[in-house]
Image (cartoon, rainbow, N blue to C red):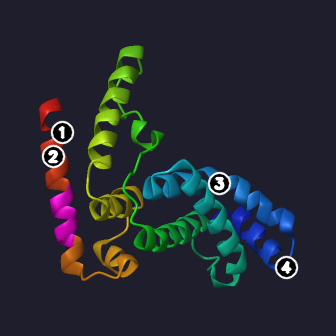
Amino acid sequence: MPSQTDRDLVRQARQGHTEAYGELVQNYQSRVFNVCYRLMGELREAEDMTQETFIHAFRHLGQYDPDRPFAAWIRRVATNLCINRYKTHKIDSLPFDEELEKPVPGDPVTPEAVQLQAEKSEKVRAAICSLPPVYRVVIELRHFQDLSYTEIAEQLNLPLSDVKSHLFRARRLLAEKLRPYE
């Protein structure tokens, strides 16, 4: 269930209150940008896709189900738009943001631990960036957006067996690339 605030803001935005939609944009702008940046790989492209996401979402607010989280819906809109753009422009790079740098629960929060986590995140980020684009997309959808294999297949319009194969290969390549750092 989305928070009452999101539900109220969507209801108000559907009634034409642009300030309410502006608040939704403000609340979700950084999350949408992170998705777009990971998928598009370029700052300007990610900014454009973020803006396009919110424009598209505003035009299609009637399709949003208020019984579901707004965050998941807006991320899905962003992902779909980026994938459509990706298919037409063949994106080659994919930098990752600070979402990889979350501290591990139970680890001591010392400067050394923070530095080690940042170094580890940078190595993972570099390994993911070196993957072929289709593998980066399935990694994003599975591990950052927690989509099921079936949902990924639907999203990418691929057979389920291809999704499983792409994820298997992507994980194997990542393991190979990260093995020297174990």
- Residue 138: give x, y in percent of width and height: 31, 64
The boundaries of the magenta stretch are 164-170
Mark toward the viewer: 1 or 4? 1
Of the image marks 2 and 4, the number of the one nearer the N terminus: 4
Which element carries disc 2, helix, strand or loop? helix
Q: CA distance from mark 3 to mark 4?
A: 21 Å
Q: Tell me the kind of residue under disc 2.
A: Ala
Q: CA distance from mark 3 to mark 2?
A: 32 Å
Of the image marks 1 and 4, the number of the one nearer the N terminus: 4
Give yes or no for contact between labels 3 and 4 (Cβ–Cβ under 8 Å). Answer: no
Residue identifier under label 1:
178
Mark toward the viewer: 3 or 4? 3
Q: Quadrant of residue 66?
A: bottom right
Q: Residues within 10 Å of mark 4 (few under 14, many from 20)?
A: few
Residue toward you, 107 or 23: 23
Q: Main secondary structure of the magenta part?
A: helix
Residue 20 vs residue 77: left or right?
Answer: right
Residue 182 seen in render: no
Q: Check residue 87 for magenta coloring.
A: no
Residue identifier under label 4:
15
Give yes or no for contact between labels 1 and 2 (Cβ–Cβ under 8 Å). Answer: yes
Of the image marks 3 and 1, the number of the one nearer the N terminus: 3
Residue identifier under label 3:
29
Residue identifier under label 2:
175
| Placement of the N terminus among the 4 image quadrants | bottom right
Of the image marks 3 and 2, the number of the one nearer the N terminus: 3
In this view, the residue farthest toward the front is 89
Residue 60 vs residue 91: left or right?
Answer: right
